[in-house]
Amino acid sequence: MSARKTARRTCAPALVLAISLYALTAEAARNDRPSRAPVKGCAWEQRADATIGLDAWVQRCDFGSRKIDFVFVGKSLAVRFSDGGAPDPVVDVIDVADGETAQASIKRHFAAHTEPALAARCRLAPYRGTRQLAGVQRYTFVPNAAYRKELRAQRDPNEVGDPPCGDWGEAPDGIQYFEVRPANPVRKILFVRVGQDEPLFDEKTLRVITSQRAPAAK
């Protein structure tokens, strides 16, 4: 084997490691503070759970008769209302299986949580409803060509229809998507439910973590 080929093989893992470290550094810098000011009556706080694998900026709010905060439930970050019932998940953390690509993991998760006949009529596509962030890929499930044609023929222009691909696909009345960070070695993806309005968590600075990278609560 030539010295040049040996050098290439030696440098390749180092290059991958360098790229991954750069991506983690950039992600940590972006996560260092919220991307916007808090809502009146609210204050930002950073919440992290190494077991789940998520680090997020969230708002704790006191509106007098209603208080809002965020908690980790199962494998999700959830919003809790003092005058409501159980906390509502807003960000789910999904593990990527060994030997599986992030896209394959998204498809597996979607298929496991969607009625098979409906899942067969939907396809994975890049999510275009938000501004793209560096180092972040967003995906959703949309109707395939035949299904979309059928939906258009049945559409009532005076009504907002149901999500055509179920609870884990594109939402006609809000924003939700799967989120992937290709350069991050942490093998997790996110399902983010932004909703209709600007959320009380910061969807722009979410970070997947391991126990070694979990910051102290602020």
Image (cartoon, helix red, strand yellow):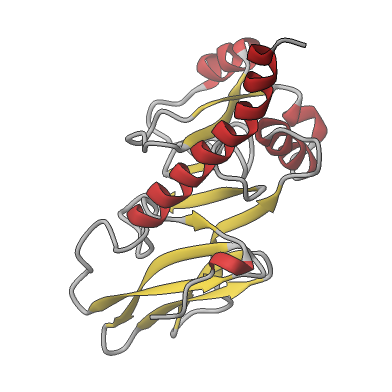
- Judge by depth and name the residue closer to the eye, 184 or 79: 184
Residue 34 visible in the current orientation: yes
Q: Is residue 106 left or right of residue 169?
A: right
- Give the image quarter of residue 88: bottom right
Say how many tags the image has: 0
Between residue 180 and residue 129, name the one nearer to us.
Answer: 180
Left or right: residue 145 compared with residue 79: right
Q: Is residue 195 visible?
A: no
Residue at (45, 26) in percent of width and height: 156
Q: Classify residue 57 as left or right of residue 140.
A: left
Give above or below for 211 relative to 1: below
Residue at 57 percent of width and 11 percent of height = 149
**Residue 71 image point, x, y percent:** 53, 76
Spot occupied by residue 123 in the image (x, y as percentages of width and height): 65, 22
Return the residue found at the far bottom.
64
The C terminus is located in which quarter?
Answer: bottom left
Q: Quadrant of the N terminus?
A: top right
Q: Name the foreground residue: 143 vs 17.
A: 17
Vertical placement of 5 versus 86: above or below?
above
Q: In x, y percent, where is residue 105?
A: 72, 38
Direction front: furthest residue: 3
Q: Tell whether 45 sits left or right of 49.
A: left
What residue appears at the point 49 percent right and 34 percent down from the top-left corner?
Answer: 137
- Where residue 53 sits in the image (x, y, percent)? 61, 62
85 in relation to 101, above or below: below
